[in-house]
Image (tube, grey):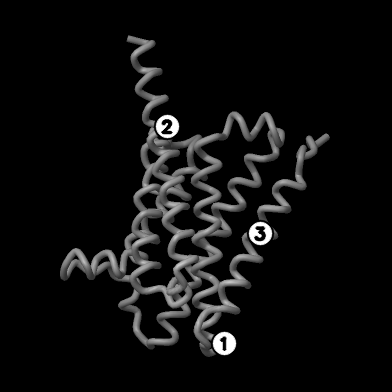
Amino acid sequence: MAKRLKNAWVLWLIALATVGITVAVELTAPVASPLGAAIRALALTGYQLVFWAILSSAYVPQLVRFFGRPFIKIHHLASVTGLVCITLHPILVAVDSRSASVFLPRFDSVQVFLQLGGRPAWYLIALAVVAALLRQRLGTGWRAVHMANYVAFALATAHANLLGGNFQSPVVRIGSWVLLTVVVAAFARRRWLAARGARRKA
């Protein structure tokens, strides 16, 4: 018999907040065509889902105790759904611009690289998601690959703030930097715990 997910209302609240934020930001963003609005909404939704996936991966033992073992499947669902959103985003951009070059990272300068940071970020997130799904085959090495999410989120934040149409609001900009700060703190905590564990084994 499958185990039931405990405290599922918290996850529903997070899901509703994620959708609600996307809708609210889109309604207050500059007017765009239906395609442009879809491009922006997919980017913001994917950005939030990647944030939740990264944050939850840093606290898996605690969250499994709170939600129960089925939480792992919810975490993977959020990761894959986030990847789908950030994949549809450039696909629609390519359709709109009639160019597949939107999938190619640019290295003209640091500014251009960061402005178009969503491109390398997509590859890093895709790599991290695939590594997580194949973790049983990859062994403990999958964790190192999974860390690519942190770099990807930083690149995505830079891209969103420098180019994102719905990131022109100061509130949204500040919110994105708050999320990045939380992600950096989660990364620092993981590294600190790993270093402490290594010292204990030495």
Q: Count every numbered label the image shows and give the total.
A: 3
The quarter of the picture where residue 193 lies is: top left
Residue type, mark 1 in image: Pro
Q: Earlier in the sequence, mark 2 or mark 3?
A: 3
Q: Is residue 116 left or right of residue 47?
A: left
Q: Is residue 103 above or below residue 181?
A: below
Residue 34: give its label: 1
Between 185 and 45, the residue placed more toward the observer is 185
Residue type, mark 2 in image: Arg
Residue 125 lies, in percent from the top left, at 42, 54
Residue 199: give its label: none
Which residue sits at x=48%, y=38%? 135
Q: Nearer the viewer, mark 2 or mark 3?
A: 3
Residue 29 lies, in percent from the top left, at 52, 79
Residue type, mark 3 in image: Ala
Q: Is residue 63 above or below residue 149?
A: above
Q: Is residue 49 above or below residue 131?
A: below
Q: Which residue is mark 3?
A: 17
Q: Nearer the viewer, mark 1 or mark 3?
A: 3
Label 2 Cα neighbours within 10 Å, binned few <14 / some 14-19 / many ≥20: some
Which residue sits at x=57%, y=87%? 34
Which residue sits at x=34%, y=75%? 102
The residues tagged by marks 2 and 3 sit, at their Cα atoms, a distance apart of: 26 Å
Q: Which residue is mark 2?
A: 190
Residue 120 lies, in percent from the top left, at 32, 61
